[in-house]
Image: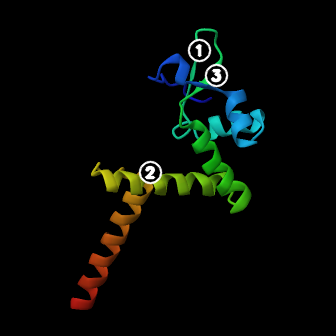
Amino acid sequence: MAVMNTIEETPQSRLSIGQIAAATGVPKSTIRHWEREFSDFLETARSPGNQRVFAPDAAEKVEKIKLLVEEQGMTLRGVRRELERLDERERLSTGLPRVEDPTEEKARRLADLISERLVRRLME
């Protein structure tokens, strides 16, 4: 289940799922699915009436996902990787620290270990 975030904008700046669907041409059911799949990218919160509300940049984010899926033919897994790459590029451009992927870190350590052992054997 998607994590419901607290969106800090004023109630007037929040967008309903209907507004997002109208602006992007993406069906509400697809937006709901993408909300669950990309909860860290497509932030939602709940209004006092328990309605789903989106941050003001949500239509732009839905358009980005739509482009990757429909025009570039990416799977949702591929979209996730691309969004992570975009996030990484944004972090680097703003000077924020790099977020390490645990799997990537393990692979790097394993490659280092193998390299060290190969060098030792070659030196013997």
Q: Quadrant of the rendered structure where residue 32 is? A: top right
- Front residue of 102 and 8: 8
| Picture layout, residue 26 above or below residue 78 | above
Q: Point out the tag, 1 or 3, that comes first from the N-terminus.
A: 1
Q: Which mark is residue 52?
A: 3
Mark 3 element type = strand
Characterize the local packing of mark 3: few (<14), some (14-19) or many (20 or more) Cα atoms within 10 angstroms.
Answer: some
Closer to the camera in the image, 31 or 122: 31
Q: Locate the N terminus by quadrant.
A: top right
Q: Which residue is mark 1?
A: 47
Residue 87, disc: 2
In the image, residue 39 above or below residue 87: above
Instruction: Report how far apart the C-alphas of labels 2 and 3 lie in the structure.
Output: 24 Å
- Picture residue at 53% right of the left edge, 41% below the top: 41
The amino acid pointed to by label 2 is Asp
Q: Quadrant for residue 117, please give it.
A: bottom left
